[in-house]
Amino acid sequence: MSLTARVTPPKELIGLSSLKDNPGSKSQAKRLGRGPGSGKGKTSGRGHKGQKSRAGNGKPTPGFEGGQTPIMQRFPKRGFTNVHGKDYTEINLDQLGRWIDTGRIDPTQKITMRELKVAGLVKGVKDGVKLLGNGSSGFQHKIEIEVSRASQKAMKQIERKGGKVTCVYYNSVGLQSILSPSRFFIQPKLALPTKKRDIAWYSDPKNRGFLATEQEASSSA
């Protein structure tokens, strides 16, 4: 079969003067309320009375249940949202040990939240990372790690193996600078805590706070 036999010529030539929408791509709007002769006069095809004949196309506001007491009013509120609370991403020692055993985290280097994120151990960090002691009996690595918070069980197990835990305070800018340093042209200096409870917590040697470490270093100097 020749090439000319397979090519179907266009039914009409295409030019700037012949551009138009495809048939059926646009529908003509209904003209409502323009007299009985149009077939859509008087009630405009909505019928008589009722919820669907009213303005707003009969769609009630969200939560409206036809007049009965809505569910958000039938049940009382419980609890509250703590505006001062922190949402820490939690990791356990058994998870950290598994990542080290599989070579995804280098135990010879200092481990920060940046290394934890790059290795895929934490995702969606909101206010920081908290290290917990689940599976501490099987953790056998000597590491140096910096997190926002750590449990006493986790700290004791790491220090039992000759490691070191430091709890560092991060505000929103400091958290972004350590998790995504490429977003900053110049790395900002980490801010110190301003609230009394944060200052007290990070100044307590029992919590391995970074302020306690700085105070010990300055006193020894």
Image (cartoon, rainbow, N blue to C red):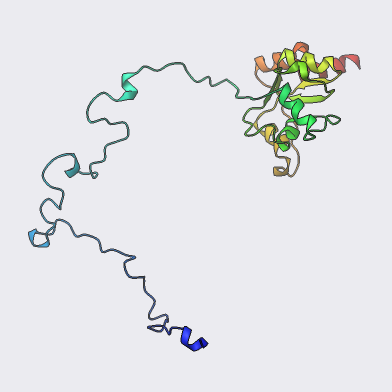
Q: Please indicate whether residue 17 sits to the left or right of residue 110 in the image.
A: left
At which x and y percent is residue 82?
53, 19
At which x and y percent is residue 216?
85, 15
Q: Please indicate whether residue 157 sits to the left or right of residue 82 in the image.
A: right
Quarter of the image holding residue 126? top right
Quarter of the image holding residue 17? bottom left
Say which residue appears at 73% left-offset and 25% top-offset.
Answer: 147
Say which residue appears at 13% left-offset and 59% top-offset.
Answer: 34
Please, is residue 158 above or below residue 182 in the view?
above
Say which residue appears at 71% left-offset and 26% top-offset.
Answer: 95
Quadrant into which the C terminus falls:
top right
**Total tally of numbered discs in the picture:** 0
Comparing 157 with 18, the one in front is 157
Quarter of the image holding residue 136? top right
Comparing 146 with 109, the one in front is 109
At which x and y percent is residue 123?
64, 34
At which x and y percent is residue 2?
51, 88
Residue extending farthest to the left is: 36
Residue extending farthest to the right is: 221
Q: Please indicate whether residue 216 sits to the left or right of residue 187 in the image.
A: right
Q: Please indicate whether residue 13 sits to the left or right of residue 54 in the image.
A: right
